[in-house]
């Protein structure tokens, strides 16, 4: 009885997927593209502003602190609303795709600034001093000493931020940007195959997120500092 | 002086919206802590089937975007069975509890395992059973280590209550959106003016005023207790 039910459900599911394959794939692609842009953007924002914060570079450091606190202490959904529905009033009209990648990039960049700041600050002072004493310039010391060590310390928390960036792209549903979640809800509204839609949607997100967390563990053991390798 | 439209809008957003936000946040926090601490403590028992089930629960609800979880509860469950139909506020609170309890469970496991073995042994020697040992000896000590992550969780829960807006629950963002749409309508309902910029900026300010002190508190607790 249960097996028969499960079998019908799986046939339903596979016919649902093959019927809507093109739309679902297009949605998944947009989710991945927006996430990829945002992850790359968040990496560079985090690297530069995190370094500015850790080295207490005047003005830049203070501005970065304000950026980080504002973004971390307000909901990303409100930030998306502000960019898409609030800004046009003052003459800044951004299309859905621009708001899509911009919102998640700004959000990820703020969290990553904190990740990298903490990573760079965890590098023992004597390493930097040794670099400077050997005649490396400040920038060369950062690139050759602080970045390789601090970057690895920041790696686990920054990859968690990238996973959150991917999950947050689902919120772009509110501006009707046709990524995976928006696409799935459109299909659901047309076909009324509610259970199938949400099963496929949930399985897809879990596959993406679990793959990324598996990658973290692989990368973590590969890039771990020698003294932390077990 | 502020323009005339501000006062009724702000009053609606605070009296209806903010109250709704705090209501959802309070239910979600209480539920997450209760379920999360229970599951997290059970996770320290070395019984594989139980541990696998709790692990799966944690990984699923942590892995799914909260919006998708809330959609599943709000749209999919009623399609499975009519008894599983919830209003928007309840559905969002359940979604946040599933996600929040997964976070708390993971943190609790770490906190309970950080309590030295001797504490367990001493409590057993005094005649405490498993439940008594955990509720009177282990948990009070583990709670100290749990406090900073719980404050961070509270901040995240408060911010994530905005996701309830998507299914139309009355909370701060939804209240702001309703007012912003009302003002666009011609008089006497609205003003025929767009004030989305000020309204959404205002929503951000309110969330910032709530979250900022709490994130500071979490940072202070982290330094003090660890």
Image (spheres, rainbow, N blue to C red):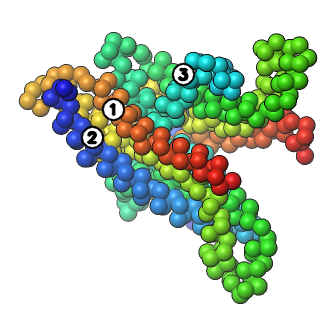
- Determine the chain carrying the residue at label 1: B
The total of numbered circles placed on residues is: 3
Circle number at residue B202: 1
Identify the residue at horizontal 69%, vertical 38% (top origin).
A157
Q: Return the x and y of residue A210 as percentages of the image width and height.
A: 68, 42
The residues tagged by marks 2 and 3 sit, at their Cα atoms, a distance apart of: 30 Å
Q: Nearer the viewer, residue B6 or A182?
A: B6
- Determine the chain carrying the residue at label 3: A
Circle number at residue B107: none
B135, above or below A143, in the image? below
- Determine the chain carrying the residue at label 2: B
Q: Quadrant of residue B117?
A: bottom right
Whether the residues at callouts 1 and 2 have beta carbons within 8 Å, the answer is yes
Write down the residue under mark 3.
A63
Q: Secondary structure at mark 2?
A: helix
Q: Are marks 3 and 1 on the same chain?
A: no
Q: Secondary structure at mark 3?
A: helix
Q: Nearer the viewer, residue A6 or A28?
A: A28
Write down the residue under mark 2.
B13
């Amino acid at each position: 009885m249960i097996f028969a039910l499960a079998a019908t459900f799986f046939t339903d599911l596979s016919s649902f997927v093959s019927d809507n394959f093109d739309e679902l794939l297009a949605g998944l692609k947009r989710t991945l593209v927006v996430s990829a842009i945002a992850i790359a953007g968040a990496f560079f924002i985090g690297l530069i502003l995190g370094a500015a914060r850790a080295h207490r570079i005047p003005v830049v450091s203070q501005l970065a602190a304000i950026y980080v606190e504002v973004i971390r202490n307000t909901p990303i959904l409100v930030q998306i609303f502000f960019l898409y529905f609030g800004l046009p009033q003052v003459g800044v009209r951004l299309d859905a795709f621009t708001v899509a990648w911009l919102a998640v990039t700004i959000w990820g960049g703020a969290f990553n600034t904190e990740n990298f700041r903490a990573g760079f600050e965890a590098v023992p002072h004597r390493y930097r001093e040794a670099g400077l004493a050997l005649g490396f310039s400040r920038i060369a010391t950062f690139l050759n000493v602080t970045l390789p060590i601090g970057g690895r310390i920041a790696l686990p928390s920054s990859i968690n931020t990238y996973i959150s960036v991917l999950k947050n792209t689902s919120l772009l549903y509110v501006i009707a940007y046709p990524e995976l979640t928006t696409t799935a809800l459109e299909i659901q509204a047309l076909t009324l195959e509610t259970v199938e839609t949400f099963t496929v949607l949930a399985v897809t997100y879990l596959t993406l997120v679990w793959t990324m967390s598996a990658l973290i563990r692989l990368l973590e053991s590969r890039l771990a500092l020698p003294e932390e390798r077990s | 002086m502020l323009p005339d439209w501000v006062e009724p809008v702000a009053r609606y957003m605070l009296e209806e919206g903010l109250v709704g936000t705090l209501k959802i946040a309070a239910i979600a926090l209480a539920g997450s802590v209760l379920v999360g601490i229970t599951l997290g403590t059970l996770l320290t028992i070395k019984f594989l089937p139980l541990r696998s089930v709790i692990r799966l629960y944690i990984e699923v609800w942590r892995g799914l975007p909260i919006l998708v979880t809330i959609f599943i509860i709000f749209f999919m469950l009623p399609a499975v069975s009519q008894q599983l139909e919830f209003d928007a506020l309840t559905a969002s609170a359940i979604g946040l509890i599933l996600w929040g309890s997964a976070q708390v469970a993971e943190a609790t496991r770490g906190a309970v395992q950080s309590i030295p073995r001797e504490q367990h042994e001493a409590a057993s020697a005094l005649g405490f059973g498993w439940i008594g040992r955990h509720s009177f000896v282990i948990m009070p000590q583990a709670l100290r280590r749990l406090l900073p992550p719980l404050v961070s969780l509270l901040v995240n829960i408060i911010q994530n209550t905005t996701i309830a807006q998507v299914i139309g629950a009355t909370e701060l963002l939804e209240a702001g959106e309703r007012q912003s749409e009302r003002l666009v309508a011609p008089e006497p309902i609205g003003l025929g003016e767009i004030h989305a910029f000020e309204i959404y900026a205002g929503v951000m300010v309110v969330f910032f005023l709530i979250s900022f002190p709490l994130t500071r508190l979490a940072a202070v607790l982290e330094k003090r207790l660890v």
